[in-house]
Image (tube, rainbow, N blue to C red):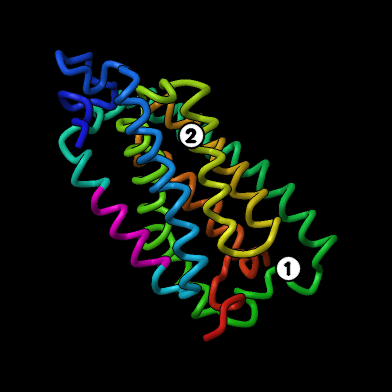
Amino acid sequence: MIPPASGRDCRPAPPTSEGSLGGSTSTKIALCLEFLAIFGGGPVLVMIVQAPLVFQLLLWLGAFAAWRFTRNHCPPPLPIEERRRELRSIICRFAAVALVLGVVTWIVMPKAFFAFPRDHPWLWLAVMVGYPMLSAWPQEMLYRRFAYLRYTPLFGTGIGFITATGLAFGYAHGIFLNPIAVALSTAGGLLFSANFARHRSLTLVWLEHSLYGCLIFTIGLGSFFYTSALWHP
């Protein structure tokens, strides 16, 4: 294993005498193959097996490994003013996106609009409670914090990281077998990666991801992100 960043922050470690994170050609090749295996091969494996439980198992195994890799290298808490500024940005951005997505869903899919909370209120409530921890958190641990710490020699900490992880995030949602899931997830992945590259807070990016995920299930787009509705034994 190539060691993560040193210290309790999300900055890449300085080069070592072996070049473990110094950007040597052999290191970059190894990291590239690893990135493709994890973020490219993982979704392919899920598609081959075609079992939702496999998807959840792989997601949580990956998130646990990522947590083990990064648990001693998280950044210090943001200053309170910066945290408030980021929270205001998240809320304002979410309100705008929610309005646009809500109107589009209402126009294009009027029967599905708010059908989930209306027809299955208790199941909807369970999703609202469970989605942030069972789905959003492991995804953000893998695609943001772990990827930021692990693959900086490949992508850097700016546009390269944002593009690579955002596209990988969208690609992973190809397991749902529809272009809507891929398009929305790619847009979300680019947004989450851009925000994480700026503030490096797993909590903030997890919160934002949770808001959008719960929105999608609430306004009627959840069927595009539901594996059991697409795969049958």
Residue 31 in the image, given as x and y percentages of width and height: 34, 33
Query: Which residue is found at the position 41% from the left and 22% from the top?
Result: 157
Residue that extends furthest to the front in the rendered view of this protein:
26
In terms of depth relative to the viewer, which is nearer, 17 or 106?
17
Number of numbered discs = 2
Query: Counting other residues with Cα less than 10 Å from the Cα at mark 1, is it few (<14), some (14-19), or many (20 or more)?
Result: many
Query: Which residue is found at the position 60% from the left and 44% from the top?
Result: 186
SS state under label 1: loop
Q: Which residue is mark 2?
A: 193
Image quarter of the N terminus:
top left
Taking 159 as reference, is 96 above or below it?
A: below
In magenta, the rendered stretch is 55-65
- Queried whether the magenta region covers residue 178, the answer comes back as no
Taking 199 as reference, is 24 above or below it?
A: above
Q: Which residue is mark 1?
A: 113
Q: Quadrant of residue 45?
A: bottom left
